[in-house]
């Protein structure tokens, strides 16, 4: 489905077939494949296997999962919420969306539950698109200010990003990449350094795919190259997304984000986090102590997916058999290393007082 952001929506509801369609992100970049979700189980598998991923998109997908469950049985609201909540522990948007569904359906008559659940999911889908576009506009203003200072001495603005925080991580536009798209549309000459983002290579597979689709100059680098690029003066700012941010500004994101923030701090480079307010967990303060960090399957580390010489996608082993693996999915960047949070309402410092003001 063509999107307002100039690419493809990651998820949409197909009225004719009464199914939820998604871009199967496990098939990218080698194939743009559309999958259909027809049941609660389909949705749980899609979230767990990362056919859909990114905190905002997980939340909207879960809302559609509630609809698909209630379409079959109006008595399963609570159990459906529990099943979906267990799929990914770190991303707060999942729990935020499920709470909205619970609140919105709590007093609805059984015969009206499915219809109301579908309405809620469609509302969340539309909200996500609007929110992400607003994040892009807020962030583009930040990039414009930086470019005005840099333009006299260089030909482009160099951005380092990590993981995929683009349209594929949301319904449309993205968070960090929404800023890039809006800035490019405003005429700022951009170049993006794309971390490969091991182990699933979301940077290489997804971010490079998105940027290529939109014709934005970019260069893929290995995860450990970011610090060197900063030392060489080849990075003007870091721009990432978030899976959960605490009320004092600690940012939980794809593992490796913390290392980029440390390097940016050491080299005096601004480190921005683009996120919807729904990704802020106002119930917790200390990201290190209170955010559950997901550990994923060892196979993600032990194997790689790519095309062989004949163009056929293949999965290959890259480590000795029986190698012990710790596959930690996320890390926490303390608020002191974050220059600012770019939200749909405003750009604010990563402080408790400024974040609390977002609720006013």
Image: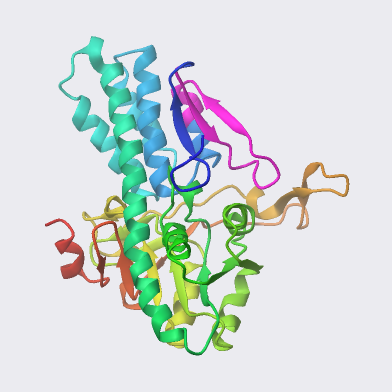
Is 198 placed above or below 4 here? below
| Residue in the foreground of this view, choosing between 198 and 14 | 14
Q: Is residue 140 above or below residue 100?
A: below
The part of the image, by quadrant, that contains residue 245 is bottom left
Q: Is residue 307 above or below residue 152?
A: above
In the displayed structure, does residue 237 sit left or right of residue 327?
left
Extreme residue in the top direction:
111
Magenta stretch bounds = 18-43
Q: Position of residue 255 (x, y in %)?
A: 50, 62
Figure disc tally: 0
Report whether 216 appears left or right of 149: right
In the shown orientation, is residue 53 left or right of residue 25? left
215, 294: nearer the viewer: 215
**Looking at the image, which is closer to me, 86 or 72?**
72
- Where is residue 166 drawn, in percent x and y? 48, 53
Farthest right residue?
Answer: 310
Residue that lies at the very extreme toward the front in this rendered image: 187
User: Does residue 89 appear in the picture of this structure?
Assistant: no
| Residue drawn where x is 34% and y is 60% of the image | 137
Image position of 159 with respect to 133: above or below? below
Q: Quadrant of residue 96?
A: top left
Q: Position of residue 313 (x, y in %)?
A: 77, 43
x then y, percent, for residue 328: 52, 57
| Residue 26 is one of the magenta-drawn residues | yes
What's the coloring here? rainbow
State the residue at coordinates (41%, 35%): 61
């Amino acid at each position: 489905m063509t999107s307002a952001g100039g690419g493809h929506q990651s998820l949409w509801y197909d009225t004719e077939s009464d199914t939820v369609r998604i871009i199967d992100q496990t098939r990218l970049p080698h194939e743009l494949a559309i999958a259909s979700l027809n049941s609660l189980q389909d949705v749980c598998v899609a979230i767990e296997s990362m056919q859909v991923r990114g905190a905002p998109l997980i939340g909207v997908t879960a809302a559609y999962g509630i609809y698909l469950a209630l379409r079959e049985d109006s008595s399963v609201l609570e159990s459906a919420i529990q099943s979906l909540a267990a799929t990914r522990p770190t991303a707060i948007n999942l729990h935020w969306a499920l709470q909205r569904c619970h609140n919105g359906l709590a007093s609805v008559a059984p015969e009206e539950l499915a219809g109301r659940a579908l309405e809620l999911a469609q509302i969340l889908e539309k909200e996500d698109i609007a929110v992400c576009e607003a994040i892009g506009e807020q962030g583009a203003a930040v990039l414009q200010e930086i470019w005005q200072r840099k333009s006299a001495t260089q030909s482009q603005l160099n951005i380092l990003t990590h993981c995929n925080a683009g349209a594929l991580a949301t319904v449309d536009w993205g968070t960090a990449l929404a800023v890039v798209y809006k800035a490019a549309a405003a005429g700022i000459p951009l170049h993006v350094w794309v971390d490969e983002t091991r182990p699933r290579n979301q940077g290489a597979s997804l971010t490079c795919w998105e940027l290529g689709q939109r014709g934005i100059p970019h260069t893929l680098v290995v995860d450990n190259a970011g610090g060197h690029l900063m030392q060489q003066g080849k990075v003007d700012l870091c721009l990432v997304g978030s899976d959960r941010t605490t009320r004092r500004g600690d940012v939980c994101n794809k593992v490796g984000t913390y290392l980029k923030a440390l390097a940016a701090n050491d080299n005096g480079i601004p480190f921005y986090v683009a996120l919807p307010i729904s990704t802020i967990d106002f119930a917790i303060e200390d990201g290190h102590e209170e955010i559950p960090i997901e550990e994923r399957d060892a196979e993600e580390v032990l194997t790689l997916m790519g095309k062989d010489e004949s163009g056929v996608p293949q999965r290959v082993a890259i480590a000795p058999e029986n190698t012990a693996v710790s596959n930690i999915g996320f890390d926490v960047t303390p608020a002191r290393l974050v220059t600012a949070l770019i939200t749909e309402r405003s750009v604010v410092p990563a402080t408790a007082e400024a974040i609390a003001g977002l609720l006013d």
